[in-house]
Image (spheres, rainbow, N blue to C red):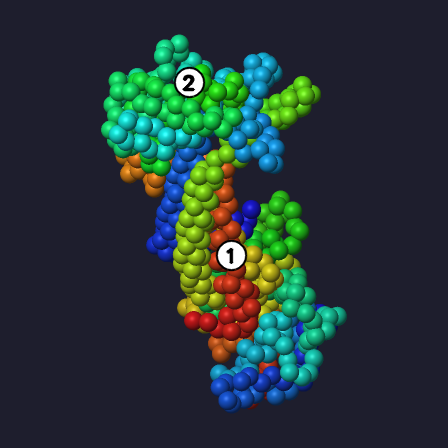
C-alpha cells in the first residue's frame, strides 16, 4: 500500500545564525514518506523536528542535501514556484491552529482554493464536504473565536486538505488540545488518510499521538534515526 | 473583490486605530475641500468682478504704429460700423465704446493728475450692467451738459462734492492743450485703492470734445456667459478680418493681470496646504499600516505557508491602504460638503483683500472636479503609505513569521 514516495529528504543540513554563533539544526537528516502513511518525527526539543518539517514543507531551504516532493526537486526552486508547490501538494496544520480571525470557518477552509482558478460552485462543494468530514457541518459561518480548540484544529485540518494535497505536515497538532479532543482530532486525520490516501507527517512529543502512527522516526542532534 | 472584503474586515480589527486614520483622512480631505472651494469661489468672484467692473469679456482696440504715441493713436474709427459687426453675434449682450485719457483735474486752487475715461452711460449702465458703486450723487446721464463722476479718494484730494464744478485738462490728439468745465454729479468707488486715488469718468462725447476727436480707445464687449468668451473672440476675429478692419480682440483673461496674480498666489497656497496634509496623512497611515503588519506577522506566515505568493501578501496590505483611503476620503467629501454649505449659508464677513477697500461674504464653492481629485489623492496617498509596510510583510521569512509570538 505504501509504495509511492510523496516526500524524500536526503542528507539535509541546515545551520542557523544566532548572533555571532552558528547553530546546526540539521546535520544530514534523511527521510522518506509514502502515500497514505502516518509518520511521526519524535525527539527532544532542539533535535531538528521542526526544521526538517520546514524543509519538507518548502518553508525553508537546506544548506546542502536534497528535498524531493514526488517527482519535484524543490531544493532549488524559486520563491513563487515553492508557493505553488505548497498550495497544490502540501497541507499544514499548526499547534496554535493559525486560522485567520477575520474569516469564518468556511472562508478559512476556502482560502487555499481562492489561490487557484477553482470555480465558486466547486469551491463551495469541496469546503462543505470537508467541513462535514471533520464534523463541523453547520458551523461554517462561525468565526474562529466562536469555536472550541478542537473545532478550530478541525477547521485547520479541513484547510490543509482542501486542495487535495499528497502530504499534510503537522507541527505538534495536539499540543494545545486536551487528551479527548486530541484523540478526536487524530481520529479525523486517520479517517481522512483512509478516504483520500493522504500521508501525514507529524512533529510531536505527544506519546498518545506517537503510538497511533505507522512509523516513528526519532531525531537526535539534527540526525534522523529510524 | 475578495481582497477588498478582507481589507474591510481587517480594518475593523483594531477599530480605534482605523477610526483615528479615517478621521485624519476625513479631516485632511475636508480641509483641502474647504481651502479649494474658497479658492474657487475667490477666483470666480474675482473673475466676474473684473468683468463686471468694466473690463468686459472682450475688448476691441486698434493697432498702434511703432512711432505713434499721440493720444488715441491706436484708436478706433467708424465705431458704428464696427459695432454692427460685433452686435451681429447673438451671444453679445452689449458693446460699450470708451475713450481713455490722462490729464489734470482742477478746482482752481487744487490740481491732481487723473486717469479719465469717457463712457456711454446707456450702454455701460444699461445693457452691460457696469453700474458704478455710488458714494454720493448720481451716475452719469445722456444728453446733459458736461458732467463728471469722481472717485472717492480723488474727490477727497480735490475737496469736491456732488454739485461742485471741476476743470479737466488734457492734450488733444493734435498735441494742443484743451480744457473743459464739468459738473461733478456723483462720487463713486471702484473698491480698489489705487483706482480710487486717480479716476474720473465722463460721458464719451465729453471725452471726445476734450481730446478733439471722433475716435474711441476701445470697444468693450459684454457676453451672455463668461464661458463663451473664447468662442466669440474667434468668431469676431474672423468676421472683423473679412470686413477688412485691422483691430485686435483681447479677452478679459489677457487684460486681467491682477486676476492671474491672485490666482497664482492662491494656487501656490493651496498646493502647499495640500502637500502638508498629504505628508501628515502619509506618515500617520504608514505608521498605522506598519502596526497592522506587526500584529499579523504569524498570520502572514500562515498565509504564505498555505501558498499565498509574496506579491499577493503585498497586494493585501496595499488594498487595505486603498480601502482606508477611499473610506476616509468619502467621509471627508461628506464632511467637506456639509461644512462648505454651512459656512456659505452663515455669510461670514471677510476682511478686504490687499488693495481692496471693501470686504466680502465668505463663500465656498462645491467643485465636483475638486472632490474627485481629493478622493483620488487620498486613495493614492494611502496606497503609497501602505507600500513600505506591505513590502516588509512580503519579505518576511516564513519560518520566522510562523514562530512570531
| Position in image of residue B26 (x %, y %) | 39, 46
Residue for point 34% across, 28% down = B105
On the same chain, marks 1 and 2? The answer is yes
Residue for point 61% across, 49% down = A123
Q: CA distance from mark 1 to mark 2?
A: 67 Å
Residue B324 position (above or below residue B98): below
| Position in image of residue B52 (x %, y %) | 43, 25
Q: Nearer the viewer, residue B363 or B307?
A: B363
Question: Which residue sits furthest top?
Answer: B143
Between marks 1 and 2 in the image, the one whose residue lies nearer the viewer: 2
| Position in image of residue B234 (x %, y %) | 63, 26
Q: Nearer the viewer, residue B255 or A110?
A: B255
| Residue B201 location, quadrant | top left
Q: Is residue B319 visible?
A: yes
Residue for point 49% across, 83% down = A45
| Position in image of residue A155 (x %, y %) | 51, 58
Dot 2 falls on a residue whose secondary structure is: helix
Residue B162 position (above or below residue A197): above
Identify the residue position indicated by label 1 in the image: B384
Neighbour tally class for label 2: few under 14, some 14-19, many 20 plus, Cα within 10 Å? many
Residue for point 43% across, 13% down = B122
Identify the residue position indicated by label 2 in the image: B206
Q: Earlier in the sequence, mark 1 or mark 2?
A: 2
**Quadrant into which the C terminus of chain B falls:** bottom left
Dot 1 falls on a residue whose secondary structure is: helix
Amino acid at each position: 500500500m505504501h509504495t509511492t514516495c510523496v516526500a524524500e529528504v536526503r542528507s539535509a543540513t541546515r545551520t542557523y545564525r544566532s548572533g555571532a554563533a552558528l547553530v546546526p539544526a540539521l546535520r544530514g537528516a534523511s527521510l522518506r514518506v509514502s502515500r497514505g502513511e502516518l509518520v511521526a518525527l519524535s525527539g527532544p526539543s532542539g533535535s531538528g523536528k521542526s526544521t526538517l518539517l520546514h524543509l519538507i514543507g518548502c518553508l525553508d531551504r537546506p544548506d546542502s542535501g536534497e528535498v524531493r516532493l514526488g517527482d519535484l526537486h524543490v531544493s532549488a526552486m524559486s520563491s513563487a514556484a515553492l508557493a505553488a508547490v505548497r498550495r497544490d501538494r502540501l497541507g499544514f496544520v499548526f499547534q496554535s491552529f493559525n486560522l485567520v480571525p477575520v474569516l469564518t470557518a468556511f472562508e478559512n477552509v476556502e482560502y487555499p482554493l481562492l489561490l487557484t482558478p477553482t470555480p465558486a460552485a466547486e469551491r463551495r462543494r469541496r469546503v462543505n464536504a470537508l467541513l462535514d468530514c471533520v464534523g463541523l457541518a453547520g458551523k461554517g459561518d462561525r468565526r474562529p473565536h466562536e469555536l472550541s480548540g478542537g473545532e478550530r484544529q478541525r477547521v485547520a485540518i479541513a484547510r490543509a486538505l482542501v486542495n487535495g494535497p499528497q502530504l499534510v505536515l503537522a507541527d505538534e497538532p495536539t499540543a494545545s488540545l486536551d487528551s479527548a479532543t486530541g484523540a478526536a482530532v487524530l481520529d479525523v486525520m486517520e479517517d481522512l488518510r483512509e478516504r483520500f490516501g493522504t500521508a501525514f507527517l507529524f512533529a510531536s512529543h505527544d506519546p498518545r499521538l506517537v503510538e497511533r502512527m505507522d512509523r516513528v522516526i526519532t531525531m537526535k542532534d539534527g540526525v534522523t534515526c529510524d | 473583490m475578495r481582497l477588498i472584503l478582507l481589507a474591510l474586515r481587517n480594518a475593523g480589527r483594531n477599530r480605534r486605530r482605523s477610526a483615528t486614520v479615517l478621521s485624519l483622512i476625513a479631516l485632511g480631505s475636508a480641509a483641502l475641500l474647504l481651502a479649494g472651494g474658497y479658492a474657487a469661489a475667490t477666483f470666480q468672484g474675482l473673475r466676474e468682478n473684473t468683468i463686471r467692473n468694466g473690463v468686459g469679456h472682450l475688448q476691441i482696440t486698434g493697432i498702434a504704429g511703432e512711432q505713434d504715441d499721440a493720444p488715441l493713436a491706436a484708436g478706433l474709427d467708424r465705431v458704428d460700423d464696427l459695432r454692427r459687426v460685433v452686435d451681429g453675434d447673438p451671444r453679445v449682450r452689449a458693446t460699450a465704446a470708451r475713450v481713455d485719457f490722462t490729464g489734470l483735474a482742477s478746482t482752481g486752487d487744487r490740481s491732481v493728475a487723473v486717469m479719465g475715461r469717457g463712457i456711454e452711460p446707456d450702454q455701460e449702465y444699461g445693457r452691460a450692467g457696469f453700474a458704478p458703486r455710488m458714494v454720493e450723487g448720481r451716475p452719469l446721464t445722456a444728453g446733459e451738459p458736461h458732467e463728471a463722476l469722481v472717485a472717492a479718494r480723488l474727490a477727497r484730494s480735490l475737496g469736491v462734492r456732488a454739485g461742485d464744478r471741476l476743470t479737466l485738462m488734457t492734450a488733444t490728439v493734435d498735441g494742443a492743450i484743451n480744457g473743459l468745465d464739468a459738473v461733478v454729479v456723483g462720487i463713486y468707488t471702484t473698491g480698489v485703492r489705487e483706482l480710487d486715488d486717480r479716476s474720473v469718468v465722463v460721458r464719451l462725447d465729453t471725452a471726445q470734445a476734450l481730446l478733439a476727436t471722433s475716435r474711441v480707445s476701445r470697444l468693450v464687449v459684454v457676453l451672455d456667459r463668461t464661458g463663451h468668451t473664447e468662442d466669440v473672440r474667434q468668431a469676431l476675429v474672423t468676421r472683423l478680418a473679412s470686413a477688412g478692419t485691422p483691430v485686435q480682440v483681447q479677452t478679459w483673461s489677457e487684460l486681467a493681470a491682477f486676476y492671474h496674480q491672485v490666482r497664482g498666489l492662491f494656487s501656490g497656497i493651496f498646493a502647499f496646504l495640500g502637500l502638508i496634509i498629504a505628508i501628515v496623512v502619509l506618515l500617520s497611515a504608514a505608521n498605522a499600516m506598519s502596526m497592522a503588519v506587526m500584529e499579523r506577522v504569524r498570520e502572514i506566515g500562515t498565509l504564505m505557508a498555505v501558498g499565498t505568493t509574496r506579491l499577493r501578501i503585498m497586494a493585501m496590505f496595499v488594498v487595505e491602504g486603498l480601502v482606508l483611503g477611499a473610506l476616509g476620503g468619502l467621509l471627508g467629501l461628506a464632511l467637506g460638503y456639509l461644512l462648505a454649505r454651512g459656512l456659505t449659508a452663515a455669510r461670514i464677513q471677510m476682511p478686504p483683500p490687499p488693495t481692496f477697500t471693501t470686504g466680502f461674504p465668505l463663500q465656498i464653492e462645491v467643485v465636483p472636479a475638486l472632490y474627485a481629485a481629493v478622493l483620488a489623492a487620498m486613495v493614492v496617498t494611502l496606497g503609497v503609505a501602505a507600500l513600505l509596510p506591505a513590502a516588509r510583510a512580503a519579505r518576511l521569512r516564513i519560518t520566522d513569521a510562523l514562530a512570531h509570538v
